[in-house]
Image (spheres, rainbow, N blue to C red):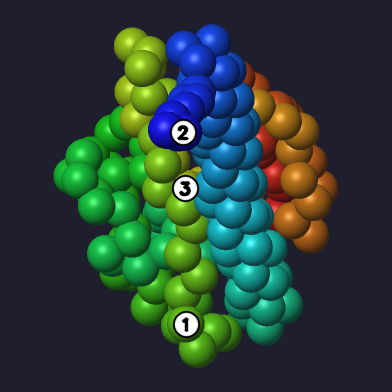
Amino acid sequence: MLMNKFRGFTIVELLIVIVVIAILATISVVTYSGIQTRAKNAQTVNAAAAWAKILKLYHAETGFWPTVYSCLGTTSTYQGNNGQCWDSTAWTVKSGFLSQVQPYTSNYPEPDTTDTTAGTANPSRRGLLYSTDNSTYWIMYVFQIGSGTCPSVGLPLRAGPNNLGGGYHCIYNLV
């Protein structure tokens, strides 16, 4: 009588397969996370470049910069944290600002709103902010997650990158 001898996998072979799968899964998760960060930052950079064009059009036609300081986006862009893009309740998307620039755009570009100070004791900073420094310069803050260099948004770079813990910001001059 012939015996069928079935040979299975050894424990060592199974462990090697499990380790290889774990390594591939880790690489995939890290790569996916990096892609998400780059996509979110690209969304913010594209929104910043679009807002720069809108603000330049406004200035070219009126000779002035909008007088209302505002986070940049729509009134529903910044969910949570009282709708703020900066740490003060005064820093939200202002409907007065949107009214001033409305003739120069058919839509309001929206940045990514991931908090760039997550995990730190710093107040929230996210998205885009239009402001002034004592009415000498009109400036745009661009908040990015992760680490990197200041991207080109069609405006002269004033300062940055400035580390915020979970990200960084760059400041651009409008004038």
Up the image or down, 14 lies above or below 141; here it is above
Where residue 139 appears, as percent x and y from the top left, is 62, 46
| Horizontal side, residue 100 vs residue 48: left or right | left
Q: If you read the primary sequence from the N terminus, does the residue marked by circle 3 or circle 2 appear first?
A: 2
Alpha-carbon span between mark 1 and mark 3: 17 Å
List the single residue furthest toward the front.
Answer: 1
**Residue 165 placed where, x, y %?**
50, 17
- The 10 Å Cα crowd at callout 1, few under 14, some 14 to 19, many 20 or more, is few
What SS does tag 2 mark? loop
The amino acid sitting under disc 3 is: Gly
Check the picture and name the quadrant holding the N terminus. Answer: top left
As rendered, which of 91 and 108 lies closer to the eye? 108
Q: Which residue is mark 1?
A: 107
The residue closer to the viewer here, 84 or 144, is: 144
Three-letter code, disc 2:
Leu
Task: Classify residue 114 by image quadrant.
Answer: top left
* Label 1 SS: loop
Q: Disc 3 to disc 2, how far (Cα)? A: 74 Å
Task: Give the number of marks.
Answer: 3
Residue type indicated by callout 1: Asn
Instruction: Please tell me the numbered disc located at residue 127.
Output: 3
Q: Is residue 146 visible?
A: no
Q: Are marks 1 and 3 in contact (CB under 8 Å)?
A: no
- Give the mark nearer the N terminus: 2 vs 1: 2
Q: Quadrant of residue 89?
A: top left
Q: Visible in this render: residue 57? A: yes
Tag of residue 137: none
Q: Which residue is mark 2?
A: 2
Q: Observer-nearest residue: 69 or 83?
A: 83
- At a point 74% along the width and 56% down the height, the residue shown is 153
Secondary structure under badge 3?
loop
